[in-house]
């Protein structure tokens, strides 16, 4: 974004592109991409739960000037008799990923067999001694060539399909995002920017999709009579307008087929327009109103590129808005089952069973007890944008220390997905409580989970709902943080929240009727 803004200032005559100020700020803007391997190393190491400092240091060794100079020297350089491939590791993604993945196995091996007294210095040293040479000899070239081949493949598809490829990708993006598949395009986009200086498929398609989400949500805001949905749609529309689509996708369009039809159609029409106009992106950032300078060519060759991007922007918001405005109808009252089925990315593939929801009685307020032993954390601290953004409802989350989930109050079970990772409970005051054990645990397809109830069962506070193998799920790489939210929050509010360590049965929060 900074580089795009500098290009804009230069075009408008506000800044001399040859000035020292321009040069320094251009370098500042380029720094995150130049040192992208270090950011990749830190993120991958955190995900793999290995020493982040060791991972960053190992990858940074590939980028120090002496090694870069040796690799690019005439005649090349050798290590253990093998000639090293001349690769500039700055801007690269795959070499860093492979290096950290290899580090994961090396660190585990040495941690297992190294005496504790010398582990603190011996393990990092051995990791450096092994990982860096292996990366220079094998993993670095392998990752670099893999990235080059992936970029070449995507560009070949684009060359065959042309503008149709942009339209098709824009149309399937909402479904890719729902299951996390869109992340597979990010390394390609970064590699394309590093190698060619521009990207002409993923980010232009993302512009079409992001703005179509906004247009569809604006239409839902105008058409719906549901005040809760109206408020959600307006907030989501504004967020999507600026490139943040999760509230729109998980809170509105995935839950309403007619709105999703508007998004897909609008994305396709806008994608065709953007593809035909040959729009290219020059900065790696989520496309939206505030980030439109990403489509300014810093070299000044594609002078109309920004104008064409704004044309695609206008087509996306108008097409999706009009189509959704025509098609959308207020649905019947939804339950927590539908929310889980179409809501969070971690539950996007959960089929929605028929919910048996008890009608609200004279009960107004219900005190929820903690359904598990553990530590209570605020919802906005959960490592999931949907839950943290309260798209699925307000509440709290518990990081469990045992493998049991019990009923937080009396009620009727209204949702048990086939994957057994979540339970929906309809309270006696009509509130629907969603208890989602872990993040992305739907991908386990029921492994390590055992349910003790079925839809329609009447339960009392403290009754066992499900059990799960905490150790097995954690070893599989999943976060067991369990959000406990009021899924139909339009009529209910949460108050008196608890924080810190908690035992099963301790007061968690109170659900009050508005």
Image (spheres, grey):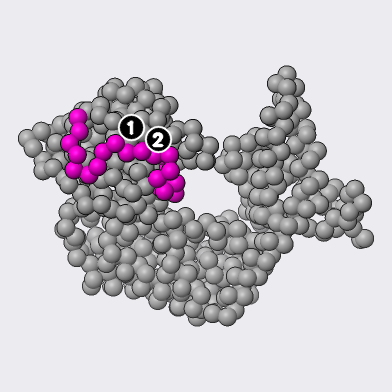
265 left or right of 2?
A: left
Q: CA distance from mark 2 to mark 1?
A: 8 Å
Q: Is there a contact, CB below 8 Å, between mark 2 and mark 1?
A: yes
221 left or right of 499?
A: left
Classify mark 1: residues with Cα within 10 Å, few (<14), some (14-19) or many (20+): many
434 left or right of 88?
A: left
Q: What x and y, as percent, mark residue 439?
A: 42, 42
* Residue lying at the far top of the rendered structure: 117
* Quarter containing the C terminus: top left
| Above or below, comparing residue 449 to residue 68 in the picture | above
Query: What residue does disc 2 label?
Result: 468
Residue 116 lies in the magenta-colored region: no
* Quarter containing the N terminus: bottom right
Query: What residue does disc 1 label?
Result: 405
- Please state the extent of the stretch shown in magenta in the rendering: 432-460
| Mark 2: secondary structure | strand
**Residue in the image at 85% along x and 58% along y:** 72
User: Toward which corner of the image does residue 482 lie, by quadrant?
Assistant: top left
Residue 457 lies in the magenta-colored region: yes
Q: Looking at this view, is 492 or 314 the one in front?
A: 492
Closest to the camera, between mark 2 and mark 1, is: 2
């Amino acid at each position: 974004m900074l580089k795009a803004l500098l290009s804009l200032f230069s075009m408008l005559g506000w800044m001399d592109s040859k000035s020292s100020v321009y040069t320094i700020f251009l370098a500042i803007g380029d720094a995150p991409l130049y040192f992208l391997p270090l950011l990749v190393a830190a993120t991958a190491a955190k995900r793999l739960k290995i020493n982040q400092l060791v991972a960053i240091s190992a990858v940074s060794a590939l980028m120090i000037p002496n090694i870069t100079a040796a690799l690019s020297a005439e005649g090349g350089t050798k290590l253990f008799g093998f000639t090293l491939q001349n690769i500039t590791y700055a801007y690269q993604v795959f070499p860093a990923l492979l290096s950290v993945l290899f580090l994961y196995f090396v660190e585990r091996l040495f941690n297992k067999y190294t005496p504790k007294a010398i582990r603190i210095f011996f393990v990092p040293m051995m990791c450096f001694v092994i990982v860096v040479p292996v990366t220079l000899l094998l993993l670095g070239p392998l990752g670099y060539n893999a990235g080059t081949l992936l970029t070449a493949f995507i560009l070949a598809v684009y060359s065959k399909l042309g503008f149709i490829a942009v339209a098709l990708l824009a149309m399937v993006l909402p479904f890719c995002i729902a299951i996390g598949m869109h992340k597979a395009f990010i390394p390609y986009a970064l590699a394309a920017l590093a190698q060619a200086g521009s990207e002409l498929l993923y980010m232009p398609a993302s512009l079409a999709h992001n703005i179509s989400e906004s247009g569809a949500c604006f239409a839902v805001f105008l058409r719906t009579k549901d005040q809760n949905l109206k408020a959600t749609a307006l907030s989501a529309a504004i967020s999507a307008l600026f490139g943040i689509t999760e509230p729109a996708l998980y809170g509105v369009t995935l839950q309403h087929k007619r709105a999703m039809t508007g998004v897909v159609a609008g994305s396709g029409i806008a994608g065709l327009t953007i593809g035909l106009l040959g729009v290219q992106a020059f900065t790696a950032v989520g496309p939206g109103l505030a980030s439109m300078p990403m489509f300014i060519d810093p070299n000044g060759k594609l002078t109309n590129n920004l104008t064409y991007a704004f044309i695609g922007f206008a087509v996306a918001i108008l097409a999706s808005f009009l189509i959704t405005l025509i098609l959308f109808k207020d649905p019947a009252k939804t339950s927590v089952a539908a929310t889980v089925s179409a809501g969070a990315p971690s539950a996007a593939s959960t089929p929605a069973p028929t919910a048996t929801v008890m009608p609200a009685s004279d009960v107004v307020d219900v005190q929820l007890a903690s359904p598990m032993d553990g530590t209570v954390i605020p919802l906005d601290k959960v490592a999931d944008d949907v839950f943290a953004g309260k798209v699925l409802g307000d509440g709290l989350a518990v990081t469990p220390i045992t493998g049991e989930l019990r009923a937080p109050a009396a009620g009727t079970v209204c949702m048990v997905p086939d994957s057994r990772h979540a339970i929906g409970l309809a309270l006696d005051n009509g509130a629907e409580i969603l208890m989602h054990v872990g993040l992305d645990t739907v991908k386990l397809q029921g492994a390590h989970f055992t349910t003790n109830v079925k839809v329609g069962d009447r339960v009392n506070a403290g009754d066992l709902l499900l059990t799960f193998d905490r150790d097995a799920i954690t070893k599989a790489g999943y976060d067991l943080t369990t959000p406990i939210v009021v899924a139909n929050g339009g009529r209910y509010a949460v108050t008196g929240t608890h924080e810190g360590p908690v035992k099963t049965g301790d007061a968690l929060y109170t659900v009050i009727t508005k």
